[in-house]
Image (cartoon, coloured by chain):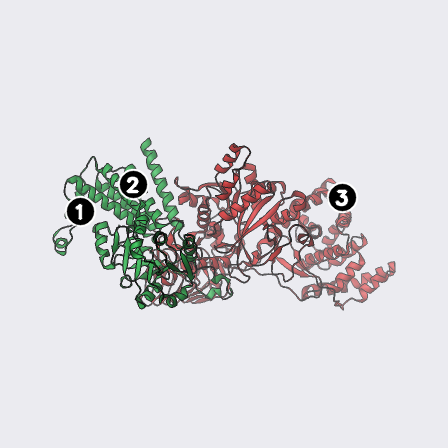
Chain colours: A red, B green
Amino acid sequence: MSSRGGKQKKGNVTSEQEEEEQPLQAVLVADSFNRRFFPISKDQPRALLPLGNVAMIDYTLEFLTSTGVQETFVFCCWMSNKIKDHLLKSKWCRPTSPNVVHIITSDLYRSLGDVLRDVDAKNLVRNDFILVYGDVVSNIDVSQALQEHRHRRKVDKNISVMTMVFKESSPGHKTRCEEDDVIVAMDSKSKRVLHYQKTQGLKKLQFPMNIFQHGSDEFEIRHDLLDCHISICSPQVAELFTDNFDYQTRNDFVRGILVNEEILGNQIHLYVTQDGYGARVSNLQMYDSVSLDMVRRWVYPLTPEANFTDQQGQGCTHSRHNVYRGAEVSLGHGSQMEENVLIGRDTSIGANCHISNSVIGNNCTIGDNVVLDRAHMWNNVHVSSNVEIHQSVVCDGAVVKEAVRLNKQCVLAYNVVIGPNLSLPEGTVVSMHHPEEEEEDDDDEFLSDDQEVGHTFNPAEVGPEGKGYIWKASMNDTEDEELAQCLWAFQLEVLGTLQRGLEENIVCDNLVLEINSLKYAYNITLKEVMQILTRVVLEYPFQQQGTQLTTLQYTGSLLPLLKTWSPVFKNYIKRAQDHLDCLSAVEELFLEQDTHQTAMVKVLMKMYQLEILEEEAILKWFSTGATNDKSRQLRKNQGVSTTYRAYTEQQERHCVGKGIFFSMEGAVRRTSVCGTVRPVQTPGLNTEVFLSSSAPEVYPVVERSRG
Amino acid sequence: MPGADKEADLTERIEAFLADLKRGGCGTGPIRGSGETARETTALLRKVTAQARWSSAGDLMEIIRKEGRRMTAAQPSETTVGNMVLRVLKIIREEYARSRGSSEETDQQESLHKLLTSGGLSEENFRQHFVHLKANVIEAINELLTELEGTTDNIAMQALEHIHSNEVIMTVGRSRTVEAFLKDAARKRKFHVIVAECAPFCQGHEMATNLSKASIETTVIADAAIFAVMSRVNKVIIGTQTVLANGGLRAVNGTHTVALAARHHSTPLIVCAPMFKLSPQVLYGQFLRPHGLVFALTCTILSKVNVHCPVFDYVPPELITLFISNIGGNAPSYIYRLMSELYHPEDHDL
């Protein structure tokens, strides 16, 4: 309010009054644009998943409404109809709602960037707005942050474009999400963000010197902040997203603004709150901890018994040790609800059960002698007797038969049947969808009948009466996944370009130009361009003539191609490091295509002859690269097969270097080149961490759904 | 249709009020005092009376009851809302009885014998239509509103009878009524106030600041020091959130400690409570969220730690010496009588 009072200064009063009368707006992105909740989110969008028996989007809307937002734009993409139905039925769409909700759906949104570009295109926001995801749970009062934001914009003539809301919480706190772990350098006085970086488990972080050189004399580098994913944005944010069409996420945006600060003069600020609660349910681990925090009342006044969604029959009572009971709950003789338990309406629990730290939905039945600890059960779940569930999620309609034990971090997706007499190992994900049907048509919701013909349930995995398929723990990481998608699209484009180049006989210089422009459009590094290019070229024969090629046919069609495109390669491969990167890309491809490994020698030879690769680089690669058995095998193989060829060539050329190269053959020398760890993005495939020296082996980060 | 417009406007107002109640709650220093809530509730009920469609007192009572149920459900810990609904229901009953020409006193006299013999005053009796009933009810609600406006002043006026020169007075947390009470006494007398800070929200600090601004000699003590300091205290004056039907209190956390310490030292305990805080309901403690102080501790073990932060204490009536309400001082044992004067027994369950 005080900032509003402060606005009454001078100038044209009318426009200021208009400004004041404008309602506070919010943009709510009801899509995560990633698959962290797969396969659960295959049946239900993430924003509608229940947290404490209330859909997550309701928490976000309640948060927005309580901060005084009067107009909210909800953007949905995945399963937009369900979200729309839910919202139309909820209290937000009643005529008396203080917060007018507009639902905007489109299947074309692929990222936060697309949404904000659409906001700009449709000219939806007129003033500062709050940007949140549909899975943010918070009770932070952002009005203070809003005031500060407005004040800054008033004083500094629209320089500050965004205020990010952070909550103070020391490292190691369980609601801190590992992927969202950030380190922020800020100006203590003006609260301006100078540097923003995700730690991603790094032990060593680097800060550019220039952030310490200008401006004020007090800086803070903070690692005790929890990103609430709530940002107060000025209308410029949407415009900036339009101008920079390569911004996909808020992270891109923040980095872009900070890097271009000198040029564009835009700044980002942050607001740190000490009390209040704010977290984004970005994966199942976060789901577990936010759900418990909710039951433990950290999100007051958004507590289960408050029934803030105003739905009939959702009310429940709250008693000691945070035990909440809905209407018509029956509890058998000798059953204990130890602490932090929420039980939905019409749920019945058998005798001698032991329940702690759990949320149980509506209409569930639970048998006798059941132990539930940190179990998250949704609606209509049926659990038989003698079951133990630890830190797991059980979705709607799932059935757990007699004497089943779910160990930590299991997920039973919709309508799965498990058991009897089975123990699921830690981290098992069971779904009615077969993992391979993933790429099939998404509209086909009811294909389970057809599927059963194709795939049969494995009794060893899901029990004699079980229904469902085991999903392998997914290896995707959000950011990497986004990047991988981006790279995949880029790879397709490059392929198209080369194809066209070949068909229409385009000069290589023009191809380079085209690829360069693609590089900017997809915002990827030179190194990735080079690796993808190598990959595309090497896969080209497979692409054209199918994968059943013999090695001879393969080399036959590849070698001329290499010759044609050698100028393109030369353009990208210049420094010594580029050579190594190119080689590792070649190696990687041939590791996958292990039937064609012998072709590698020819390819390398050709590349050497075309002066794409230098011999020192090949030597270096050969001597340092082997990180695992397979690649060592590859080297050996190829070494043996090249020996003969190489010797002849050596005689032809009298090249000393070559001699060294092949005298080393068989004995892979381990040099202690400084171990640089280098993640290699294989488009569309798993993310692997690749070491270019004899540094200890690093395994891919296996992101599995934790309970 | 102006009528439809009016009704839409009415529902909108009710919704807004409900939303406010849900979010506001109380505890961290209420966003507004219970006095304000009481006034708003009453004003809203007056609006309902004026704008809703009803033809007889029975209809109106039904409407008020329905809205009342929703309002009390919105924030169960805020009892004043329910109290005001009961008051309005009682007013309707009285006005109806007056319109019929019978004296309301006859209804009042409850006895075991009468309860057994009569079938109770059932709803059918409220079906009769009276032209002036609406105007009369609104008039009576307006009177109630005026009464609510003056409660704090009425209580403060009695301050000089209870606070004498050079006394040491203890209070706990922050209560607007107690603050007004002490300030009023300070105009004529000099005395010393000791304020227990009431951690973790420390409303006591604010209270102490306000009192010292009114040039009252004020000391803030930690909650743990209450017992130690009590021996020096002449009188304990506290506020409360609710006065329960048995004369007990539901008051801010720490009040029970003060009351027990006062009993141990035989110090009189005076409760300043306006009549609208008198509730026929008996409720249990409300828990707020755990407070941030614990957040700063080692967080790795936090998943195993439960943090509870109860907001209200129940103080049994034996520990209370005197209630000072806007209609004068009363002993806890007399509360039942006030209760039956204010509310109709049939309304106790909404």
Let me know if marks 1 and 2 both belong to one chain. yes
User: Which element carries disc 2, helix, strand or loop?
Assistant: helix
Judge by depth and name the residue closer to the eye, A249 or A431: A249
Residue designated by label 1:
B122
Callout 2: chain: B
Residue designated by label 2:
B46
Distance between the alpha carbons at the discs numbered 1 and 3: 96 Å
Callout 3: chain: A
Judge by depth and name the residue closer to the eye, A79 or A442: A79
Q: Is residue A627 left or right of residue A296?
A: right
Callout 1: chain: B
Residue designated by label 3:
A508
Circle 3: is it few (<14), some (14-19), or many (20+) Cα within 10 Å? Answer: some
Look at label 3 and name its amino acid: Cys
User: Which element carries disc 3, helix, strand or loop?
Assistant: helix
Residue depicted at x 81% and y 53%: A611
